[in-house]
Image (cartoon, rainbow, N blue to C red):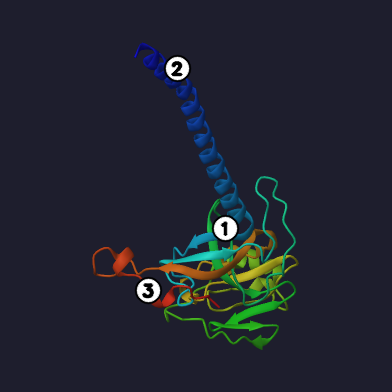
């Protein structure tokens, strides 16, 4: 009996380091799995896709407040973190594209608008109608929400006078619905919201530099109407018809 107990004690002492090694190996495997998952997530977020939430109504009715999007970052050339270099673009942004970009005025803020003018384009607006290179632009996605006064805007004038085409700067008085014609410079774009009377866009802060453009929306993966009257709007207010739709 004493010999049996002695053997059991020896086995227990032998098993203790073994169990510790097993627990350490298991923890290490978990740590490696988490590290790999984190690296994959960083890769996907930095180079391929990124989630984005629509915070305002400037792109209604194309994009609604409460829409959550996946953004294709590879299309225009994803930017490498830290070093800032870009991968080659699959294609360049073109007029009509909806783009997500770094805010011109606020750091670490993403904005979404539609490109209405590309480099070398001459664009102007007459009574809320956009013209590009002298031709009226068909914009079926645009909505007009206000018919109020349209007064001269000093902020618009302060930057637009440098890019005027065939207009005397001394008499130039741009308004929200009447401005230009102005010429879009190289490596820049003119962007506007589809909700023309409720959009803070290039009309006010100027051209969008090419290197600020991050990507193009892929599809809406979730959408809800937070103004709904039912409780728990994040669930009861889901806009089922918008899920997996692709904004154009």
Badges 3 and 2: C-beta atoms under 8 Å apart?
no
Image x and y of residue 74, in percent: 66, 63
In the displayed orientation, state which residue is furthest to the top: 2
Q: Which residue is mark 1?
A: 103
Q: Report the quarter where the C terminus lies.
A: bottom right
Give the class, few, some or many, for how many residues have Cα within 10 Å of label 3's Cα (few <14, many ≥20). some
Determine whether 42 is above or below 24 in the image. Answer: below
Q: Which residue is mark 3?
A: 239
* Residue count near mark 2 (Cα–Cα under 10 Å), binned few <14, some 14–19, many ≥20: few
Q: Which residue is mark 2?
A: 10
Judge by depth and name the residue closer to the eye, 181 or 103.
103
233 relative position to 134: left or right: left
Q: Quadrant of the N terminus?
A: top left
Q: Residue at x 46, y 75 (%)?
A: 60
The label nearer to you, 3 versus 2, is 2
Q: Earlier in the sequence, mark 1 or mark 3?
A: 1
Q: Position of residue 233 (x, y in %)?
A: 30, 65
Q: Is residue 159 left or right of residue 230?
A: right
Residue 120 in the image: state x and y as whole percent.
75, 74
Looking at the rendered structure, the secondary structure element under dot 1 is loop
Structural distance between the alpha carbons of marks 1 and 3: 28 Å
Marks 1/2: CA distance?
69 Å
How far is disc 3 from disc 2 in space, using C-alphas?
A: 66 Å
Which residue sits at x=58%, y=46%?
A: 36
Q: Nearer the viewer, mark 1 or mark 3?
A: 3
Looking at the image, residue 245 lies above or below residue 55: below
């Amino acid at each position: 009996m004493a010999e049996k107990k002695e053997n059991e004690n020896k086995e227990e002492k032998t098993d203790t380091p073994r169990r510790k090694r097993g627990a350490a190996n298991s923890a290490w495997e978990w740590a490696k799995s988490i590290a790999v998952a984190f690296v994959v997530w960083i890769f996907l977020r930095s180079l391929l896709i990124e989630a984005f939430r629509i915070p305002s109504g400037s792109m209604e009715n194309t994009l609604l407040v409460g829409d959550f999007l996946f953004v294709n970052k590879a299309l225009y050339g994803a930017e490498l973190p830290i070093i800032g270099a870009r991968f080659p673009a699959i294609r360049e942004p073109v007029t009509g594209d909806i783009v997500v970009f770094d805010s011109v005025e606020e750091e670490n803020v993403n904005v979404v608008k539609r490109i209405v003018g590309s480099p070398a384009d001459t664009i102007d607006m007459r009574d809320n109608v956009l013209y590009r290179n002298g031709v009226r632009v068909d914009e079926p996605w645009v909505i007009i929400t206000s018919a109020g006064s349209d007064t001269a805007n000093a902020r618009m004038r302060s930057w637009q006078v440098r890019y005027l085409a065939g207009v005397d700067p001394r008499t130039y008085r741009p308004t929200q619905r009447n401005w230009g014609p102005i010429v879009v410079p190289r490596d820049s774009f003119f962007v506007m919201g589809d909700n023309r009377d409720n959009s803070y866009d290039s009309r006010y802060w100027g051209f969008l530099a090419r290197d600020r453009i991050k990507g193009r929306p892929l599809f809406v993966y979730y959408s809800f109407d937070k103004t709904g009257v039912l409780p728990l709007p994040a669930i009861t207010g889901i806009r089922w018809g918008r899920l997996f739709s692709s904004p154009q």
